[in-house]
Image (spheres, rainbow, N blue to C red):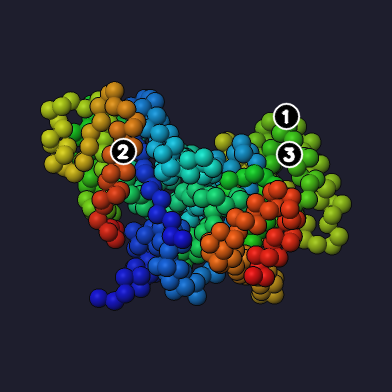
């Protein structure tokens, strides 16, 4: 029987010193039956895109607290495209401290959801599952 | 356009890393496409030095694999790494964290690190690990390191896949007793005493040496290498021991015998699994459940029930 388990990369770009939120999300997705690749803190955009390439993930979730998202997120997307990972290939979402004013710009860049502080892990799980149900057939 | 699987395999053989990664996913899913990709790749495999590392949880395998990878890169070899972590029997999910200890390797294009979950398989590997290793082999990696989950016991599956099996032990953790149990010493081509800066490392190394001496009987003597991988000590020596075993196993007559043994194990394991699936599918009408209930209530014994399943 073919096994189409969802593979998710949870990554922290930039210089954030702690990763409690990212770990909570990683564990919640694992407990929801997904395979979660966690890379630790202080990842460069290139490291994140490389991990996405090598692990062939379906979903990339970025967590950021430092405020550098408008600088780092476009670089993550550029690094993904350099590696032939197109917008339809992966679901991209972000979480952390992100001002409302930046959300439309991030959505335009290709982020399909932004989760702020206080988001329940159920919301993240349901969001990923809904996407998986309706994803384009034979994507990637 | 040609067949998509053929195109993907062609791109993999041309050195495209995205294609390599996609093929690994197909193989891991054990889909018809994955099986076809593997069939196309398999004749191109057999050139890589495949090294399996096993040892109990906490023996420092991830750190050791990272240190080994750095040493191989210093020597100009290209590298594949397959790191396996357990799937939760409750949620069927997994947290794969081996990249954390190998962050610095991620920027190196000649290192390809893939994390795998066991997906219900026992024996320290995922069911499709051998296939994923074949993809790295056909891609042209010089060395592939496979880091097992590491129950540290009876992991013959590792030896059935690797050219060289490394068993990692640590001082003061009861590993000297583990070493005396059947299985561990038999599968080890190289023994590593890791965290050798800890007390009792000398004692463990001496105990291992005496076990090896007692069982050697003119066979190839299993080398013992002491490492402290967090401090990069003993890593160059370990690579030399690995190269030495790699050269030994590459001798034509040794290689033929080793590969025949592996092929026999793999073919029979897959046939066993296919038979199992067929038996279960044939009895999907409820006969299997009836027999199980009969055994549970002691109406019949397990052998009679199994015979009835296969004989029907």
Q: Say whether marks 3 and 1 touch (CB < 8 Å).
A: no
Q: CA distance from mark 2 to mark 3?
A: 44 Å
Q: Residue furthest front?
A: B299
Q: Are marks 3 and 1 on the same chain?
A: yes
> SS of the residue at dot 3?
helix
CB atoms of marks 2 and 1 within 8 Å: no
Q: Quadrant of the N terminus of chain B?
A: bottom left
- x then y, percent, for residue B165: 65, 55
The residue pinned by badge 3 equals B175
Which of B2 and B173 lies nearest the eye of the viewer? B2
Q: Distance between the Cα atoms at labels 3 and 1?
A: 14 Å
Q: Are there few (<14), some (14-19), or many (20+) residues within 10 Å of tag 3?
A: many
A67 lies left or right of B163: left
Q: What chain is tagged by disc 1?
A: B
Q: Is residue B273 visible?
A: no
Q: Which residue is mark 2?
A: A126
Viewer-proximal residue among B77 and B92 = B92
Residue identifier under label 1: B199
Residue A121 is situated, as x and y percent measured from the top left of the image, at 34, 31
Are the residues at dot 2 and dot 3 in contact (C-beta closer than 8 Å)?
no
Q: CA distance from mark 2 to mark 1?
A: 50 Å
In which quarter of the view is residue B156 placed?
bottom right
Other residues around mark 1 within 10 Å, as few (<14) / some (14–19) / many (≥20): few
- Tell me if B140 is positioned left or right of B248 in this view: left
């Amino acid at each position: 029987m073919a096994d189409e388990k969802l593979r998710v990369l949870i990554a922290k770009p930039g210089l954030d010193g702690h990763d409690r939120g990212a770990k909570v999300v990683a564990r919640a997705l694992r407990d929801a039956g997904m395979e979660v690749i966690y890379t630790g803190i202080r990842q460069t955009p290139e490291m994140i895109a490389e991990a996405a390439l090598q692990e062939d993930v379906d979903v990339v979730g970025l967590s950021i607290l430092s405020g550098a998202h408008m600088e780092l997120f476009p670089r993550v997307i550029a690094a993904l495209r350099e590696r032939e990972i197109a917008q339809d290939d992966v679901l991209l979402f972000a979480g952390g401290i992100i001002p409302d004013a930046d959300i439309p710009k991030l959505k335009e860049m290709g982020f399909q959801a932004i989760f702020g502080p206080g988001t329940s892990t159920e919301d993240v799980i349901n969001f990923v599952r809904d996407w998986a149900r309706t994803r384009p057939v034979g994507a990637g | 356009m040609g067949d998509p699987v053929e195109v993907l395999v062609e791109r993999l053989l041309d050195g495209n890393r995205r294609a390599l990664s996609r093929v690994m996913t197909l193989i891991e899913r054990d889909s018809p496409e994955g099986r076809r990709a593997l069939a196309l790749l398999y004749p191109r495999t057999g050139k890589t030095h495949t090294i399996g590392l096993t040892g109990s949880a906490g023996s420092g395998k991830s750190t050791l694999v990272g240190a080994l990878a750095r040493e191989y890169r210093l020597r100009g070899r290209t590298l594949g790494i397959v790191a396996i972590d357990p799937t939760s029997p409750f949620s069927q999910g997994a947290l794969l964290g081996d990249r954390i200890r190998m962050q610095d390797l991620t920027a190196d294009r000649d290192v390809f690190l893939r994390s795998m979950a066991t997906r219900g398989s026992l024996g320290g590997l995922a069911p499709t690990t051998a296939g994923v290793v074949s993809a790295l082999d056909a891609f042209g990696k010089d060395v592939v390191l496979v880091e097992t989950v590491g129950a540290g016991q009876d992991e013959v599956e590792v030896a059935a896949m690797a050219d060289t099996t490394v068993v990692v032990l640590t001082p003061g953790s009861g590993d000297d007793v583990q070493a005396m149990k059947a299985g561990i010493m038999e599968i080890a081509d190289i023994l590593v005493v890791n965290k050798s800066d800890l007390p009792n490392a000398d004692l463990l190394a001496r105990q291992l040496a005496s076990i090896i001496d007692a069982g050697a009987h003119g066979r190839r003597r299993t080398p013992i290498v002491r490492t402290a991988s967090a401090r990069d000590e003993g890593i160059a020596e370990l690579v030399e021991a690995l190269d030495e075993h790699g050269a030994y196993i590459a001798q034509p007559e040794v290689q033929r015998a080793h590969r025949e043994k592996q092929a026999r194990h793999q073919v029979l394991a897959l046939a066993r699994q296919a038979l199992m699936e067929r038996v279960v599918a044939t009895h999907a009408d409820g006969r299997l459940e009836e027999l199980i209930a009969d055994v549970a209530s002691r109406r019949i014994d397990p052998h009679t029930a199994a015979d009835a399943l296969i004989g029907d």
